Image (tube, rainbow, N blue to C red):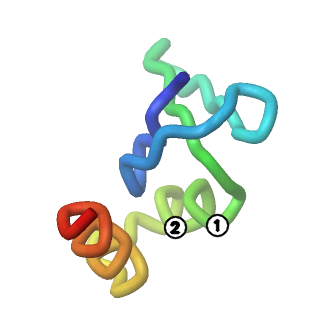
Amino acid sequence: MPKCSYCGKNYEIYKGLTLVLNDGSIKHFCSSKCRKNYMLKRRKVRWISKKKKSEEVE
């Protein structure tokens, strides 16, 4: 299972998006929301920090 390059979530391969950049690096995204935020160079988004905190508690 790949890991999202933006939020760090593991997801099923058929549900996500794969982006190949011009330099040959591969980025995996779990949703179009993650892809769009990555392309806009947003790094500190509240829904990511909430998700990571809830994963640490479990």
Question: x, y percentage for residue 28?
Answer: 54, 33
3 with respect to 31 (left or right): left
33 with respect to 2 (left or right): right
- Whether 29 is drawn above or below 42: the answer is above
Proximity of marks 1 and 2: CB atoms separated by less than 8 Å: yes
Q: Residue at x 40, y 56 (%)?
A: 7
* Label 2: element kind: helix
Mark 2 sits on what residue? Answer: 37
Name the residue at the right extreme.
14
Looking at the rendered image, the quarter that the N terminus falls into is: top right
Amino acid on which disc 1 is placed:
Lys
Mark 1 sits on what residue? Answer: 33
* Label 1: element kind: helix
Mark 2, Cα crowd under 10 Å, few <14 / some 14-19 / many 20+, is: some
Foreground pick, 40 / 7? 7
Q: Which of the 4 quarters of the picture holds residue 14?
A: top right
Amino acid on which disc 2 is placed:
Asn
17 with respect to 51 (left or right): right
12 with respect to 52 (left or right): right
Question: x, y percentage for residue 32?
Answer: 71, 58
Q: Residue at x 56, y 60 (%)?
A: 34
Label disc, if present, on residue 25 of the rendered structure: none
Name the residue at the top extreme.
24
Mark 1, Cα crowd under 10 Å, few <14 / some 14-19 / many 20+, is: few
